[in-house]
Amino acid sequence: MPPSVTEPFRPNRALGVPLVLTAGIFWSTSGLVYRLIAEASPWQVLFYRSAALLGMLALWLGIRYRRRVVLAFSNAGLPGLIGGFCLGVAFTAYILALEYTTVANAMFILAAAPFITALLGRMLLGERIARHTWGCMTAAVIGLGIMTGEELSWGRGLGELFALLAALGFSGLTVSLRARHTVDMLPAIFLASCFATLFASLGILVKTESFHLLLLDTIYSSGMGLFQIGLGFLLYTAGARHLVAVELTLLSLTEIIAGPILVWVGLGETPTVSGLVGGALILTTIVTMALMGSIVAKKDRTYAHWRFEVIVKSIKNRTL
């Protein structure tokens, strides 16, 4: 029997945190793989990456829900459509950012996503931002400033602008996932792949490029869709049901840490000292937030249990 698309569940941070952390690791491979592509244009890469993701998710949703696929999309509702569009824009902007700026620059600017998400989550969802989260955000900003101080070249601007647009789109998706956190929001990722495939097709036609690629470029581009974003977003959407919006984007900053390291090891692009120092600070922030969140959640459960016992005793005393 296919699972219910509205099955009840209890949020579990112990499950959500490693899911989102692992998703960031999968996403971090994008820069390395993109640099290995020989001739394909960014629009061609985007097309094959998005088309591969589209096929993978269509198969997964079909197997998971069978005849209830329409109901799954219905439950995702308008937030799913909006989130899909935002992520489709983010997919497109990120590939263009990799084309016009360095991998490190693009990933560093993506680190702005948690702060955008925190504000959107507060304004649109009313999600409270805990004090320790504000502290982690401040530390992450400092780390981001250290990392980008010697890296960003705003004089070129175009690649950085695309990276910022990608951060905005990713934040929009995250808030949409939280708006429907009680249901499976994987249909939103499917819609994002549809939008990105459409954007890529239009880009190829406008640029009068071919849909035909070298075999190796096709493999790399499609592999990015299947593994880098495909498996990554399967984990991320699962983790989104257990964590608030700002936690999602802060924890997924593992992408920002691992990405430059992979390019360094794989292609010899040596990061600066400031990049390593800032990355270490952001990584420390991620670990601190995860630990503090677990402590706070444990205290909340203990307090709730104590209050329950007090109420039960009060009722018993009145009865006697």
Image (spheres, helix red, strand yellow):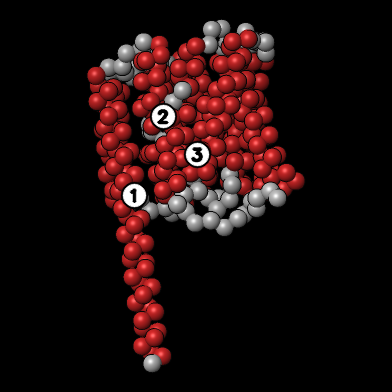
Whether residue 91 is visible here, answered yes or no, is: no
How busy is the neighbourhood of tag 3: few (under 14 within 10 Å), some, or many (20 plus)?
Answer: many
Residue placed furthest toward the right: 67
Residue located beneath label 2 in the image: 255
Q: Say which amino acid is labelled 1.
A: Gly
Residue farthest front in this picture: 1
User: Is the Cβ of the residue at disc 2 closer than 8 Å to that at disc 1?
Assistant: no
The answer to whether residue 314 is left or right of residue 227 is: left
Among numbered discs 3 and 1, the one appearing first in the sequence: 3
The quarter of the picture where the C terminus appears is: bottom left
Label for residue 128? Answer: none
Question: Dot 3 lies on which element?
Answer: helix
Q: Are marks 3 and 2 in contact (CB under 8 Å)?
A: no
- Looking at the rendered structure, the kind of residue marked 2 is Glu
In this view, 20 is above or below 306: above
**Residue type at mark 3?**
Tyr
Residue at image mark 3: 236
* Residue 293 image label: 1
Residue at screen point 47% across, 34% down: 23
Task: Give the Cα separation between the discs numbered 2 and 1.
Answer: 20 Å
Q: Local crowd at mark 2 within 10 Å, few (<14), some, or many (≥20)?
A: many
Mark 1 burial class by Cα count in 10 Å: few <14, some 14-19, many 20+: some
The residue that appears at 65% across and 53% down in the rendered structure is 4
State left or right for residue 99 relative to residue 187: left
Front residue of 89 and 278: 278
